[in-house]
Amino acid sequence: MIAKAIRSFGVPCILACDGKCEKAWGINHRPRIFVDDPQMTLFPNEISRYPIDVSDIDDHFYPPDDTLGIAPVDPGIYEDDQPKPRRPRERLNKWCARECERSVVEDDPDFAIAHGSLKRLEEDGTPIPEIKMPDYTRDHYNFHARQQAYDEALAAGQSVGEARQAAADIEVNVS
């Protein structure tokens, strides 16, 4: 994990990511699979092939990294004037904070930012566990309840297909 102290909308924050820029598509461009119709997948620049507007369908999951290959070097999305990083020195920029699906912006005031530390501290000074990063080694659901069902099914030894069915069986409010 790499991290940097930033200000986001005037608030001191920590921007953290896993540093795997070659796997970063951008949250709006990462391929997704729709829960209601798993045969209907959305890859960048394919929206027009569907008879309905799929860009607003929220009930989806992102497939794991190992099924996608390498992400585009330039997905065509910019934040302010900053693109997806191409070199290590460009990492943790505005694109990373606002568009990258692999990053987390943590605005918890318990971070010891003033001392240059990236460790979070309790009031008594004891460390709080590290920032929880998105896990793209497995399916990543857009709804917490579906993610929890999927994770529990895998932990119980079910196959990926059975875990996807367990996630699909959970009712969520998508309105």
Image (spheres, grey):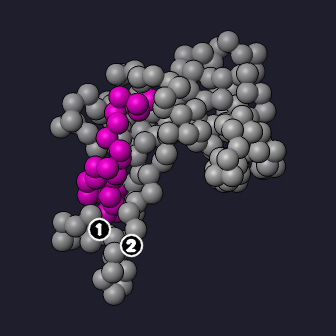
Left or right of 137 in this view: 22: left
Q: Secondary structure at mark 1?
A: loop
Which residue type carries mark 2? Ile
The local crowd at label 2, few if under 14, some if 14 to 19, many if 20 or more residues have their Cα within 10 Å, is: few
Most extreme residue toward the top, as rendered?
A: 49
Most extreme residue toward the front, as rendered?
A: 157
Name above or below for residue 132 compared with residue 58. below
- The picture places residue 166, in percent across and down from the top left corner, at 77, 45
Q: Secondary structure at mark 2?
A: loop
Question: What segment is highlighted magenta in the picture?
Answer: 1-25
128 or 59, which is in the foreground? 128
Give yes or no for residue 94 being in the magenta stretch.
no
- Occupied quadrant, residue 159: top right
- Occupied quadrant, residue 84: top left
Which residue is drawn at the image coordinates 26% and 39% (left, top)?
91
Q: Which residue is mark 1?
A: 119
Q: Which residue is mark 2?
A: 128
Left or right of 47 in this view: 83: left
Most extreme residue toward the bottom, as rendered?
A: 124
Which residue type carries mark 1? Lys
